[in-house]
Image (cartoon, rainbow, N blue to C red):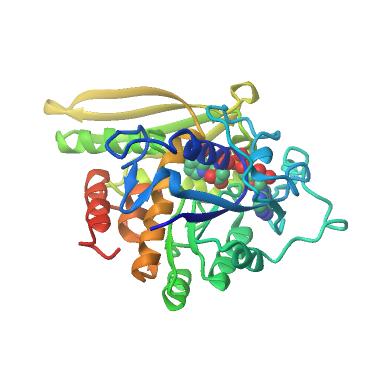
């Protein structure tokens, strides 16, 4: 079926891990199992079929560089686990809009808007022949994400929303309708890591409910040292992240319980490592107390990279089949805040049915 041309808005740590992963596994045998991918060959597309054609950034050190050079430029701190050859694909100045919080101007090395003119994103998407645009801009990029989503619509490019701005899961239905009307597929919102805090928390809560435990309260605290955590130091920047992470867990609970979930602190020396503390308290037979306490420690960015590689391939399959609007199965499987929340194992089965062509979304 050929290649999948991918453009990325926000060439930070997640983008670095995603691009490295494609080259790390480019020669994988389709019969192999790769940690973090549903399949080496997802439908007709091998992991090595992803081709990166453009990136949009605000960091003046990354703009103008080949993507293969720009992914190593600070403040990116994702571990290097693969060589990336020259891609002959550039990093373009994207619109800054609300992508850069006041406290992040220095860390993100944002360009001077009096000196640099952002490109027309839709034009670049068309010129480079992109099939899919991935949004990896910082949490709180509300207007920015909509600018990129609109550019995808204008260029006829599928859209994967890695961040918690509610576009694919827009409660008013405005954005899903736009994608349906334009005949373009989309998936989102807020990528769910391979084994991150969200899926671990969901699994523990589901297990407790399935075993008849009455859940009384729960929290999930997360700390990390990358720019994603630095950006989320301030509560006003992370409102949608808190909603997305909280609803991913509370959507499984048939009753209300005191819940506190979200990014909790920035610890610079952790770099791209993330640590999560999970706590669930409940009662079992005889109203006896039961507590589950878990600590998860993980490299943050590679944790979502494989999942996004599957999303990109699902979007390309949808494009090939002429399917438009939100893809329900892959969104439920791969994102924290999808249009429809489905238990994770069921969502995975639905994605398999989608790949086989038995489900159109
Ligand atoms: N496992 C994970 O790492 C994970 C999981 C779920 C969601 N996410 C989300 O994915 C997004 C990316 O995460 P990350 O760790 O790569 O963050 P990051 O801080 O490393 O990267 C964000 C990049 O966006 C760039 N940027 C800022 N404003 C921009 C604009 N207007 N246009 C284009 N680029 C802009 C920054 O310069 C930076 O390079 C975040 O919103 C994060 O919350 C990540």
Residue 271, given in percent of the width and then of the height, sits at: 61, 26
Residue 110, given in percent of the width and then of the height, sits at: 77, 47
Q: Quadrant of the N terminus?
A: bottom left
Give the vertical position of 329 relative to 296 (above or below). Answer: below
Q: Residue furthest left?
A: 285
Q: Quadrant of the C terminus?
A: bottom left
Q: Residue furthest bottom?
A: 181
Q: Is residue 157 left or right of 269 when viewed as pictured?
A: left
Q: Nearer the viewer, residue 249 or 56?
A: 56
Ligand 1 location (quadrant): top right
Q: Residue at x 87, y 56 (%)?
A: 115
Q: Residue at x 64, y 41 (%)?
A: 86
Give the vertical position of 158 relative to 247 (above or below). Answer: below
Residue 164, given in percent of the width and then of the height, sits at: 50, 51
Residue 298, given in percent of the width and then of the height, sits at: 46, 26
Q: Nearer the viewer, residue 71 or 297?
A: 71
Give the vertical position of 270 relative to 183 (above or below). Answer: above
Q: Residue at x 64, y 38 (%)?
A: 71
Q: Is residue 234 visible?
A: no
Q: Residue furthest right?
A: 115
Give the vertical position of 298 relative to 97 (above or below). Answer: above
Q: Nearer the viewer, residue 235 or 14?
A: 14
Q: Is residue 203 left or right of 233 when viewed as pictured?
A: left
Q: Residue at x 56, y 63 (%)?
A: 129
Q: How many numbered marks are there?
A: 0
């Amino acid at each position: 079926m050929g290649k999948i041309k991918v453009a990325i808005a926000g060439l930070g740590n997640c983008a670095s891990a995603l691009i490295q992963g494609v080259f790390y596994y480019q020669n994988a045998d389709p019969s192999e199992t790769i940690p973090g991918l549903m399949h080496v060959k997802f439908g007709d597309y091998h992991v090595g079929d992803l081709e990166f054609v453009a990136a949009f950034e605000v960091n003046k050190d990354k703009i103008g560089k080949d993507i293969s050079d720009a992914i190593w430029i600070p403040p990116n701190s994702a571990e290097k686990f693969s060589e990336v050859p020259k891609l002959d694909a550039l990093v373009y100045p994207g619109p800054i809009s609300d992508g850069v919080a006041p406290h992040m101007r220095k860390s993100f090395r944002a360009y001077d808007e009096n000196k640099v003119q952002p490109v027309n994103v839709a034009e670049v998407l068309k010129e480079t022949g992109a099939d899919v645009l991935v949004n990896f801009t910082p949490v709180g990029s509300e207007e920015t994400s909509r600018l990129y989503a609109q550019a995808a619509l204008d260029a006829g490019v599928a859209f994967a929303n890695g961040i918690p701005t509610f576009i694919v899961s827009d409660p008013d239905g405005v954005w899903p309708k736009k994608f349906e009307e334009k005949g373009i597929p989309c998936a989102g919102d807020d990528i769910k890591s391979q084994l991150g805090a969200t899926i671990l928390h969901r699994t523990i809560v589901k297990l407790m409910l399935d075993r008849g435990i009455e859940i009384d309260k729960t929290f999930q605290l997360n700390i990390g040292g990358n720019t994603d955590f630095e950006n989320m130091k301030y509560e006003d920047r992370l409102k949608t992240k808190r909603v997305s992470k909280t609803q991913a867990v509370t959507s499984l609970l048939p009753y209300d319980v005191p819940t506190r979930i979200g990014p909790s602190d920035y610890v610079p020396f952790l770099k791209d490592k993330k640590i999560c503390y999970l706590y669930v308290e409940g009662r079992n037979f005889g109203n006896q107390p039961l507590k589950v306490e878990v600590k998860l420690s993980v490299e943050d960015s590679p944790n979502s990279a494989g999942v996004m590689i599957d999303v990109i391939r699902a979007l390309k399959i949808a494009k090939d089949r002429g399917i438009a609007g939100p893809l329900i199965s892959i969104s439920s499987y791969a994102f924290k805040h999808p249009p429809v929340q489905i238990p994770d194992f069921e969502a995975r089965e639905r994605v398999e049915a989608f790949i086989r062509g038995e489900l159109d979304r």
